[in-house]
Amino acid sequence: MAVDPMPTDRTSGAPDEGSGPEIHEVSLWTVIKNRRDILRNPLPFHHRNFVRYGNTFKVSIGPSSKVVFTRDASITRHILQKNHRNYRKSELQTRDLAKYIGKGILTSEGEFWRRHRKMIQPAFHKERLHGLLALMFEAIRAELSDLPTNTPVDIYPRMSDLAFQVVAQSLFSAEDLRRDMNRLQEITETNQQMLIREMRQPYFKWWFKWSGRIGRHMALSEKARQLLDRLIEQRLGCESSPGDLLDMLLEARYEDGGPMPRRQLIDELIILFTAGHETTANALSFTFYLLARHPEVQEKLYLTVADLDFEMGDKLSLIRNLGFVQQCLEEAMRLYPPVYVIDRVSIREETLKGNVYQAGTTWLMSLFELHRHPDLWEEPHAFRPERFNPEDKRKYTGHYFPFGAGPRMCIGNNFAMYEMQLAVGWLIQQYKITTPMEALELNPLISLKPGKVELNLQPREKPGEN
């Protein structure tokens, strides 16, 4: 990757408001010429423009519609953290995504978002999640115990199933959910494919609506709501409370003491399934691929987990012994951030790096590019988990955002890290993994997904075995 001609402010403070270089604009004609490649994978198109035009540039996506792309660390921090009140989510989330998964903390804005975030946040505090660790591990072991060995297997579908079932068990803690959860997973993935087409082919939105395609997907969303409504009704009829996430959400109260309305609870559950399972499945798949490609890191990791008791040991103590597992996950999410872009729309005019941006400017902040910026990372394309050791990781806080940043940082980040630490630690304790693949195909949808992730798993000898 070429050194960027626009140096990034990698320290602190608001972006320099002195006179800045003119921001280059990529024409609508250029976008149309590259439309097939952009539909398949927009990341190479983004990268070419960053290398050519610097940390920040504009893209024309219509006669009077433009998007500003940036991989500038100080601008990203400014928008997400320092001046977040001047930015809102785009209609891609608050309208387009919301029509499929409802109006919840992922897709709402303003006072509605603040009220619900404050209400739901306690359920995801570390102390509350500690009680779910045993449920998490049982779901992980159930999904991974029958993996094929000594033959190539695409691990991504298994990671997707694993992450979905972990969310399901943590929410509902029931043993007979497989059929319902498979149907819910099918609906969420089908609707996401439709949303991606709407995102990358906005000029066809009229056709999607006129032809009835959007209506058919909306009907699927309603079926998902009916499924969850039935599960909630069953829970309300139970005499005992299992203490899972659903219980915590049912017990949550607004400031006036009122509970969450049923429709709102269903929307929040759909969002937890949609956002919670997919990003985790992606991060796990990328991590296992990188460990398979770097056997020296994998063996170092194995030595840290070889003697741990995943089955009977206290799960919280176990998590505390999975420090190097966490480093491997953090480095994998640097190279392949599940949330690879974040969008915001400005509310008022603002000057950033000497350039004036009008109210209503749409920003796309590329975490994929920021996490690989050659001015910010030594050997940016290398898999080096040691860079995230506790002594050194603070130096990256200004330009490392795997779960977003600011008040809208992912509410489930601790949940996801616990789940991934348990899954990676247990699987590497059980298996040595290799891969015949020298490169991955990337599939950037709502989150950054891999294509096929082919692994070969060889059972490790247990202590005392010959």
Image (cartoon, grey):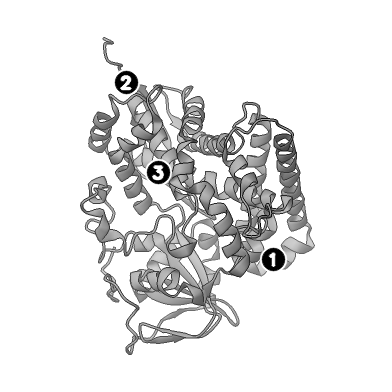
Mark 2 / mark 3, whichever is N-terminal? 3
Residue 222 is situated, as x and y percent measured from the top left of the image, at 75, 49
Mark whose residue sits in front, 1 or 2: 2
- Residue type at mark 3 is Phe
Q: Which mark is residue 460?
A: 2
What's the distance in space between the residues labelled 1 and 3, CA to CA? 33 Å
What's the distance in space between the residues labelled 2 and 3, CA to CA? 22 Å
The answer to whether residue 182 is visible is: yes
Q: Is residue 267 left or right of residue 383?
A: right
Residue 86 is situated, as x and y percent measured from the top left of the image, at 50, 77
- Is residue 28 placed above or below 306 in the rendered structure? below
Asked whether 73 or 173 is in front, the reply is 173
The quarter holding residue 434 reads: top left
Which residue does the numbered mark 3 point to in the structure image? 286
Which residue does the numbered mark 1 point to in the structure image? 205
Q: Is residue 139 left or right of residue 392?
A: right
Q: Residue at x 79, y 63 (%)?
A: 210
Q: Which mark is residue 429?
A: none
Q: Residue at x 53, y 56 (%)?
A: 40
- Residue type at mark 2 is Arg
Mark whose residue sits in front, 1 or 3: 3
